[in-house]
Image (cartoon, rainbow, N blue to C red):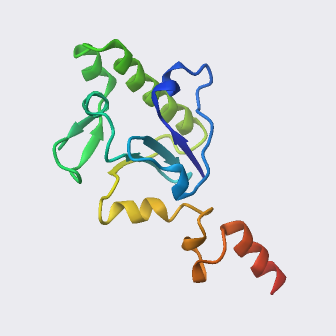
Amino acid sequence: LHMFLLNASTQQDKDLLPPPLNLSCESIVSDGLYLLDNSLQLTILVGANLHRDLLETLFIGDLSSDIGELELKPLISAEKNNHQQSNHLYLLKLHNIIEHLRTDRPPYLMVDIIREGHPTKQPIFLRHFIEDPANFPGGQFTYKEFMAHIQRHS
């Protein structure tokens, strides 16, 4: 279970994968783009305040709505509409990260794209935040503390 911030510096990194983030709400900012890998699917969280140019470069779909459905642009359409070279490189880097993660997983790992604030999809994304105490019984433990508690009482 890993989450990565896909920001502007991501495209300039020589390492393919950006450093993983803590799986907690404190790691999320509204102008960010995040990729969560839970080994069964990849989920991209689009921050509510993500820059409009980047949104248009990376995604197709209902860009005007806050909860509209989005799809990742294929590289072919990005090459035809290559008016901003740096944004094209960002899309290329995102596709390369997804393909890299698929090498260790099933060949076609589903990519789900959700927007910050989506009433039904965001809670599903947040349930993977095992470092947030609120996600466990009583809201008192992180995952690690919860497992230690279970082990002590079993």
**Coordinates of residue 120 in the picture (x, y in percent):** 32, 66
| Left or right of 72 in this view: 81 | left
On the question of residue 85 being in view, the answer is yes
**Coordinates of residue 84 in the picture (x, y in percent):** 29, 15
**Coordinates of residue 109 in the picture (x, y in percent):** 47, 45
**Coordinates of residue 18 in the picture (x, y in percent):** 58, 33
- Tell me where residue 144 sits by quadrant: bottom right
Front residue of 131/39: it is 131
The total of numbered circles placed on residues is 0
- Tell me where residue 152 sits by quadrant: bottom right
In the rendered view, would you say 15 is above or below 51?
above
The quarter in which the C terminus is drawn is: bottom right
Front residue of 32/114: it is 32
User: Going 78% across and 74% down the picture, which residue do you hit?
Assistant: 148
In the rendered view, would you say 86 is above or below 17?
above
In the rendered view, would you say 54 is above or below 71?
above
User: Going 51% across and 39% down the picture, which residue do you hit?
Assistant: 5
User: Going 54% across and 41% down the picture, which residue do you hit?
Assistant: 4
Seen as rendered, the residue at the extreme bottom is 153
- Tell me where residue 90 sits by quadrant: top left
In the rendered view, would you say 151 is above or below 117?
below
User: Going 55% across and 71% down the picture, which residue do you hit?
Assistant: 135
On the question of residue 154 being in view, the answer is no
Seen as rendered, the residue at the extreme right is 152
